[in-house]
Amino acid sequence: MSQKIEKIKIEDLVLWTENPRDPIDPNSNDQDITDKAWKDDHDKWNLLKLAKEMREFYDFSELPTVVYYGNKPVVYDGNRRMILAKLKHDLVKLPEFDKTKLPHIPKIIPCNVCDKEIAIKNVFRKHGNSGTWSPLDRDIFLHKHMNEPKSTFLKIEDATGIISNNPHLNQRFVKEEIFTNQKLKEMGFEFNQDDLESKHSKSEAKTIFDDISSKVAAKVIHTRKNRGKVIEVLDKSSRSLIETNKKKPLTKIHINATGVITPLKKKQAPRTKKREPEIFNGKLYLKPGQVSDLYRDIVDLYGFYQQKKDTFSQYFPSLVRMSLRLLGETAATDNQLPLDKYLKKNYKNAKKNLDKDAKTTLSTQNVTEGSLTQLLHIGAHNYQASNNLDQTIAISIILGEILTITHGR
């Protein structure tokens, strides 16, 4: 076993089709994997979130893990970062992705090159118990790549498809407290090697498994309620089946092949909780100095207001607006420009860096290149308009991007 640091061209690196995060057809290419990661049906890739976290610079402290197959370097760990790197250098395409959000990424990067055995151990060490994989992801990886025997949880999935069809079942407590050999046996199910055997017919098995799924989804049973009680929480009809069929012999069934178990009927999603607007559209990373200090003071001021808003008057938002003007004037002075010229000089480039939602916010609040200076001046006076918090947030968004251009690290 060996490993070494080797510099490899990003264009030569090959994304791993067997990534436990979201496996894909082995014949897929980098573009196929990128498309799947962008679609992100199972919310496992989060490319936009990673891009935002990478905002300042490409981090070399965590190297991609690479295994050579002949002369082909395959990325076993670091596939998300490599997708972003390939996007940066136009090696894959996502028309909807704003590449300006990415930092500078070199075309040649250091990688941890090792044999497959080490790579598999490295991947499992980093992800197996970190919470980035679901229980089913973990069990699949252990069986497929580390030659571990199938867990009961994986056997249930292979025999019924119930976990992949009902993702709310893909939880540790379901694996450890519901789909165990003992609990399954109490309900009339056992495994003969990898084969599922049941005392129930396929339709009866469907009734019982779907009942379990519905109870977990409705949180009738979870980590704080009815722990260890499985049969007790099932519907009367399911309990009756279990009792009636107790003395029947076990017979092999394979529910998944006939599609007996299906996802629960979709319910309306609960109303989304109102999200408080984020000043400056998130964290800014500015050079040390007066501008950075003022920016951080304003963030703290706004945070204090958010926590105590019920105790303040309706005029408190005007204090935030005044602070934004002071911040803008301080930054303009650093650039040896009057405030209006400073803002107009950087407005267009700053707006280009905003995402669609932020641009919509500017438009909705009438924050434009022509109006921005006037809107900041309003904050210096006791005008009713300066109490418009939504507009103040919109001003902070574009001002934050301007500061990033002129004072960013």
Image (spheres, rainbow, N blue to C red):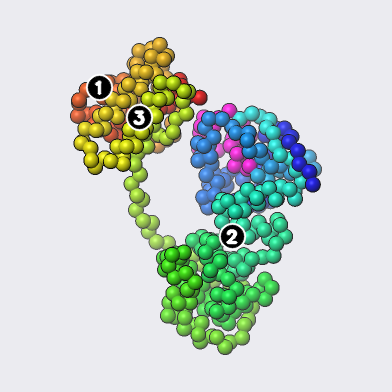
Task: Name the residue beneath numbered marker 3.
Answer: 298
- 315 vs 234, nearest the viewer: 315
Q: Identify the residue under disc 1.
A: 380
Other residues around mark 3 within 10 Å, as few (<14) / some (14–19) / many (≥20): many
Q: Position of residue 117 (x, y in %)?
A: 75, 50
Q: Is residue 68 magenta?
A: no
Residue situated furthest bottom in the rendering: 247
Q: How many marks?
A: 3
Q: Nearer the viewer, mark 1 or mark 3?
A: 3
Identify the amino acid type marked 1. Answer: Ala
Query: Magenta region: which residues?
Result: 78-104
Residue pictured at 51% horizontal, 87% vertical: 244
Does residue 31 appear in the picture of this structure?
no
At label 2, counting other C-alpha atoms closer than 10 Å, the crowd grade (few under 14, some 14-19, many 20 or more) is many
Callout in the foreground (3, 2): 3
Q: Residue 288, position in %: x, y?
A: 46, 23
The tag on residue 136 is 2
Residue sitting nearer the eye, 30 or 45 = 45
3 or 2: tag closer to the N-terminus:
2
| Mark before the other along the chain sequence, 1 or 2 | 2
Viewer-nearest of discs 1 and 2 = 1
Element at badge 3?
Answer: helix
- Looking at this view, is 390 or 299 the one in front? 299
**Among the two numbered marks 1 and 3 on one chain, the one whose residue lies closer to the N terminus:** 3
- Which residue is depicted at the point 52% across and 32% down? 55
**Disc 1 from disc 3: Cα separation:** 15 Å
